[in-house]
């Protein structure tokens, strides 16, 4: 029964994706689907996009290993979504023609900034996509008995098919289906898992006390704060989430959808994290990567196993298709278009975007197979974005006027600081280099702007 439910669900998602993607006429339609969606659809597609393998299986894995502090760290991401809803989303109406990060960057900092953000956007999307692709391998291996590599190829192949053909329309409507399934399936997993373990009190008694407590030392609090900031900054305004700010009928729809998504993520991260505690209570010697799949397999009745497995697949596919789509837009619109001597015809731009999804998908497979921990892949990928693009992009969206020299100096400072911190200094206090790199970018960005402004006044 479980296999039948999973296969039927995969076919449903594929068919919906292909159906929704009919009639795509150009790159803009492929990227933002005609700005035709209301707040509930934006809420569903945004939530489905960021709740990927890292924030579900990866969260369960880390809580299995270190405890509830990882849930608190992930709430940094929740805070980020709320802040975006309050301060960024209301300002998006001024970019009526934009379809990507690069369009905004060029408007404020020039063509070079557009190409730069495109390159780093593709790198980021490939990395985060790798986390989702890696999770696919574990799921297909555990529930369908397929080896990890074959599972990766199968799952990624389905996503590539509908995301390539239908663009944002396919991504949004498959996201809606996937969100409904995961919003029901993951709480069911925790419920049946706690019940299988003998109740909440039994789970609390079975896991180490340290897993249920906050840090007891200064170094522990520093590490927690650093990880919180990592998730606060790491995916802020990354291409797929910024694209969701372009697809609403109006600014009010975008604000509401984004706020709903941020608030929803708070209890959802608690649910996926606590599933890791249930796995620890049931099987302390378990491979941490399989914490969530183990609970599904061991605690749920057969019918619900199929439903919840489909939910886990939904989580992974919904995030993967978003980053595939965004990588294609970043490459086509932010790298190829500004470097081309003459503008490509609409059908050629669309073909290029579709071909890019295949290339990025293959790179993501290689990336996923080379790193074991799903959440570690996410943190690694974040280093391509927060230290380089986040500060100037946020400054532009918030209405701060700065010269392109600020962008160049800040990006260089961010890259240098991140590399030195992670490689030469080996991440002191477990603070990831992206945090240091982002603050280095911030300081240099505004310092150069101040010096540049004072020089202009002196002249």
Image (cartoon, rainbow, N blue to C red):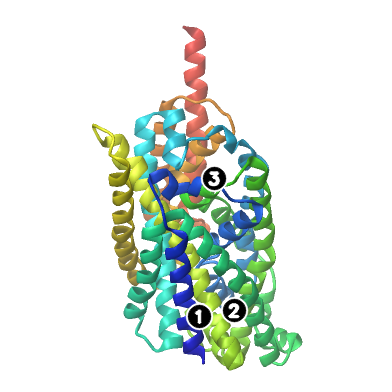
Circle 3 SS class: helix
The CA distance from mark 2 to mark 1 is 8 Å
Circle 1 SS class: helix
Question: Is tag 3's residue or tag 2's residue first in the polypeptide sequence?
Answer: 3
Q: Are marks 2 and 1 in contact (CB under 8 Å)?
A: yes
Q: Is residue 408 above or below residue 247?
A: above
Question: Is tag 3's residue or tag 1's residue first in the polypeptide sequence?
Answer: 3
Q: Is residue 413 left or right of residue 281?
A: left
The residue sitting at 63% across, 84% down in the picture is 278
Q: Nearer the viewer, mark 3 or mark 1?
A: 3
Circle 2 SS class: helix
Q: Position of residue 384 (x, y in %)?
A: 41, 50
Residue sitting farthest toward the front: 23
- The front one of 250 and 290 is 250
Within 10 Å of disc 3 (Cα), the crowding (few <14, some 14-19, many 20+) is some
Name the residue that disc number 1 marks: 288
Q: Are marks 3 and 2 in contact (CB under 8 Å)?
A: no
Q: Is residue 429 above or below residue 289?
A: above
- Answer yes or no: is residue 425 visible: no
Name the residue that disc number 2 marks: 276
Q: Position of residue 193 (x, y in %)?
A: 65, 86
- Answer yes or no: is residue 458 visible: yes
Residue sitting farthest toward the top: 459
Which quarter of the picture shows residue 298?
bottom right
Q: Position of residue 75 (x, y in %)?
A: 64, 60
Name the residue that disc number 3 marks: 35
């Amino acid at each position: 029964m479980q296999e039948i439910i999973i296969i039927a669900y995969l076919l449903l998602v594929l068919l919906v994706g292909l159906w929704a993607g009919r009639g795509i006429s150009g790159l803009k339609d492929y990227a933002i689907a005609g700005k035709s969606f209301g707040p509930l659809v934006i809420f569903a597609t945004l939530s489905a996009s960021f709740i990927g393998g890292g924030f579900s299986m990866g969260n369960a894995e880390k809580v299995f290993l270190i405890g509830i502090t990882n849930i608190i760290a992930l709430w940094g991401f929740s805070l980020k979504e709320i802040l975006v809803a309050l301060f960024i989303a209301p300002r998006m109406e001024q970019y009526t023609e934009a379809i990507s990060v690069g369009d905004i960057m060029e408007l404020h900092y020039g063509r070079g900034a557009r190409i730069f953000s495109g390159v780093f956007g593709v790198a980021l999307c490939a990395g985060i996509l790798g986390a989702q692709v890696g999770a696919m391998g574990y799921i297909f291996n555990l529930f369908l008995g397929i080896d990890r590599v074959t599972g990766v190829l199968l799952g990624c192949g389905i996503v590539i098919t509908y995301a390539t053909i239908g663009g944002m329309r396919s991504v949004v409507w498959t996201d809606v289906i996937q969100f409904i399934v995961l919003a029901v399936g993951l709480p069911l997993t925790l419920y049946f898992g706690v019940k299988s373990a003998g109740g909440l009190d039994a789970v609390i008694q079975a896991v180490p006390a340290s897993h249920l407590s906050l840090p007891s030392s200064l170094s522990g609090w520093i590490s927690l704060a650093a990880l919180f900031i990592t998730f606060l900054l790491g995916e802020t305004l990354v291409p797929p989430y910024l694209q969701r700010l372009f697809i609403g009928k109006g600014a009010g729809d975008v604000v509401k959808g984004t706020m709903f998504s941020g608030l929803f993520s708070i209890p959802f991260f608690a649910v996926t994290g606590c599933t890791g505690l249930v796995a620890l209570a049931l099987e302390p010697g378990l491979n941490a990567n399989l914490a969530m799949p183990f609970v599904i397999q061991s605690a749920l009745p057969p019918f619900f196993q199929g439903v919840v497995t489909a939910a886990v697949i939904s989580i992974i596919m919904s995030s993967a298709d978003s980053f595939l789509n965004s990588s294609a837009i970043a490459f086509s619109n932010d790298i190829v278009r500004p470097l081309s001597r003459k503008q490509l015809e609409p059908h050629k731009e669309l073909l290029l975007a579709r071909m890019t999804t295949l290339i990025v998908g293959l790179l993501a497979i290689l990336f996923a197979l080379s790193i074991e921990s799903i959440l570690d892949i996410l943190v690694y990928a974040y280093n391509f974005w927060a230290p380089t693009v986040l500060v100037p992009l946020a400054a532009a969206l918030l209405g701060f006027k700065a010269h392109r020299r600020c962008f160049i100096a800040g990006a260089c400072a961010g890259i240098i600081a991140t590399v030195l911190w992670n490689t030469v200094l080996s991440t002191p206090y477990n603070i990831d280099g992206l945090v240091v790199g982002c603050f280095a970018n911030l300081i240099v960005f505004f310092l150069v702007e101040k010096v540049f402004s004072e020089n202009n006044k002196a002249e």
